Amino acid sequence: EGKLNPHWLPFRKPLSNQAIERSISNLKALWSWLIDTEYLTRNPWRPLKVDSQAGQSNLHTRHIPNLAIDLIKRYLDECEPANKQKTQRLAQQRWLFYLLLFTGSRISAVLNANIEDIQFKNGKHYLKLTVKGSGEKVHFVPWIKQANTELQQYRDSLGLIDNVNCLLVDRIKNRSEQCVSRNLYWRQIKDLFKDTSNYFDDEINQHTGLKEIFEQISPHWIRHYVASNLG
């Protein structure tokens, strides 16, 4: 009725540490995007580092601390599956994780991409991603050399035949599914988080709040992690 909400207090008190961290992360991500689209040539926010501690604030902001990402990478390198089926499952989990980490994309976008969408333009390699929703939007994200290495390792591990029409996320050979579904992608990444937590249980318990983060994180948190570390 024309009156301000008493809980809305703009400019009346300092921002919390959590709000400051989120604001800086968003600004860094925005400037990095402007550079990728060639509107700008440098990122003034790049020198500014924000420490993300493993704790309760991460649960609210959906931020994954660097330690958690490092543990997931270590698990993928150190784990020795007991049989062929588990070896293929781990190979798929590895690729699904790194694909999100390298692109910062939504699961739905990478599921629609194929090898032909890896394109060379302006002297660099990019991945063309088509996002469908209210209309259709096309985005180009940088495609680094390590992504190609992980992609080939993934296809070799699963015995997949290469051609330009192959999906980036293809099904395991001899499985009945026609393609990897969004739900399967989601479950594989959630299982990876759980397996990592169990594998490094003693080490994780030495860090306050880290166990809770591994219990709560979802694949979409990787997108937040990439955005907060751009630049």
Image (cartoon, rainbow, N blue to C red):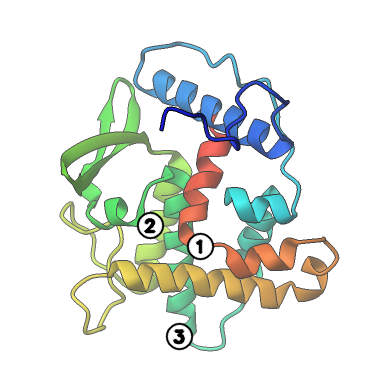
Q: Is residue 101 left or right of residue 44?
A: left
Question: How far is mark 2 from mark 1, CA to CA?
Answer: 26 Å
Amino acid bearing label 3: Lys
Q: 118 or 179, which is in the foreground?
A: 179
- Going by the numbered disc 1, the residue's amino acid type is Ser
Residue 81 drawn above or below residue 121: below
How many angstroms separate mark 3 from mark 2 (CA)? Answer: 18 Å
Instruction: Say which mark, if any, is on residue 218.
Output: 1
Which residue carries the number 3 mark? 84
Question: Where does label 2 land, which residue?
Answer: 152
User: Which SS class for mark 1?
Assistant: loop
Examine the rendered structure and indicate whether residue 38 appears above or below residue 116: above
Packing grade of label 3 (10 A; few <14, some 14-19, many >=20) is few
Numbered label attached to residue 148: none
Kindly report the distance in space between the C-alpha atoms of the residues bearing marks 1 and 3. 27 Å
Q: What element carries label 3?
A: helix
Q: Is residue 67 left or right of residue 84?
A: right
The residue drawn where x is 55% and y is 26% is 28
At x 62%, y 70%, the residue is 215
